[in-house]
Image (cartoon, rainbow, N blue to C red):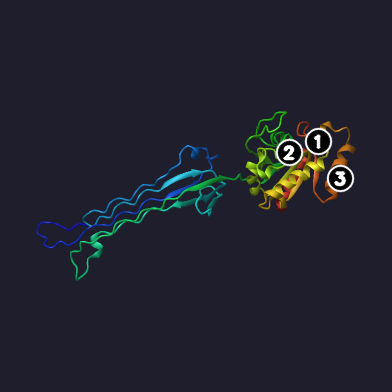
Amino acid sequence: MSFRREKYVPRGGPDGGDGGDGGNVVLVADLSKHTLLDHAYRKHYRAKRGGYGRGKDQTGARGKDYEVPVPPGTVVTDTETGEVLGDLIEAGQILIVARGGKGGRGNARFATPTDRAPRRFDEGRPGEERNIKLTLKLLADVGLVGLPNAGKSTLISAISAARPKIADYPFTTLVPNLGVVKSGEYSSFVIADLPGLIEGAHRGKGLGHAFLKHIERTRLTLHLVDISLPDPVENYEKIKHELTSYGMGIEAKPEIVVITKIDIAPDDAAISRLLDPFRDRGIEALAISAVARKGLNELVRLVSDKLLKC
């Protein structure tokens, strides 16, 4: 509330300016970010408040927005209502998660012919405060699934520049790995190596259950089956059951069954006997050896053709 007081200007009148609006808290999809690790240590983000209105009809400055960079593929959920607020997929995409408050009105706004010296003003309204949950879902064209030690990490390292940890014990892969596979002179696709699944994964057993959400983003699933296991078909069915039990429609995605480690097979007839049960069901299947680099070019071509149809 302010009145103009100037020499030789009688009855200057009200000149109280409005307050500035508060800034927003904004999430921004940033390609330089690959994890949500930064937000594990900082829990609160606050935008700048608006400036005060002043005399001489001066409006306060608007508060500066607070931009929080997150990796593309981040899903934002309100923790209190469970509502999905947004899904940041493209680089540069923004989402306002908490809007700033509205600035108040100065007494100059209330001047009327009948009330030329109002002593009335509005206080500003507070901004939003919200608790949110950030979930990162990888953006990949192809997802590798299978039991632990099925050869997923070896495959992705053989067909892309990704270098995941490879060892001869279960659960070597603890986090998803992404690789870019060149499928032609001007084409490529992104492949994700996910931690191995075990029976009961949809109920939280093992490590892979924590990463099943990443398969939701993929357009195609490569189901790897180890040739050294006693019954490849049975093991395929186990993992298929876990995908179905998890839900979200991932069991209905287009898939290719890949028999791995054929370098230890006694002959081609043994490999054919393993492929036939899948092909009899109408499931596309082929056999490879990532270590011996057998069948990799055929696999890449098949995946590339399949993605064009997805």
- Amino acid on which disc 1 is placed: Leu
Are there few (<14), some (14-19), or many (20+) residues within 10 Å of tag 1? few
Q: Secondary structure at mark 2?
A: loop
Regarding residue 186, the answer to whether it shows in the image is no
Residue at the image point whose x is 73% and y is 34% from the top: 149
19 relative to 161, above or below: below
> Does residue 200 appear to the left or right of 90 in the view shown?
right
Locate residue 293, reporting x and y percent: 77, 33
> Does residue 214 appear to the left or right of 88 in the view shown?
right
Specify the quadrant of the image occupied by residue 122: bottom left
**Does the CB distance between marks 2 and 1 fall below 8 Å?**
yes
Q: CA distance from mark 2 to mark 3?
A: 21 Å
164 relative to 111, above or below: above
Q: In the rendered image, which residue does mark 1 sit on?
A: 229
Locate residue 161, reporting x and y percent: 66, 34
Task: Looking at the image, tell me whether mark 2 or mark 3 is earlier in sequence order.
Answer: 2
Q: Secondary structure at mark 3?
A: helix
Q: CA distance from mark 2 to mark 1?
A: 10 Å
Regarding residue 234, the answer to whether it shows in the image is yes
Q: In the rendered image, which residue does mark 2 sit on?
A: 147
Q: Residue furthest bottom?
A: 114
Residue at the image point whose x is 22% and y is 69% from the top: 112
Specify the quadrant of the image occupied by residue 21: bottom left
**Does the CB distance between marks 1 and 3 fall below 8 Å?**
no
Locate residue 295, reporting x and y percent: 79, 38
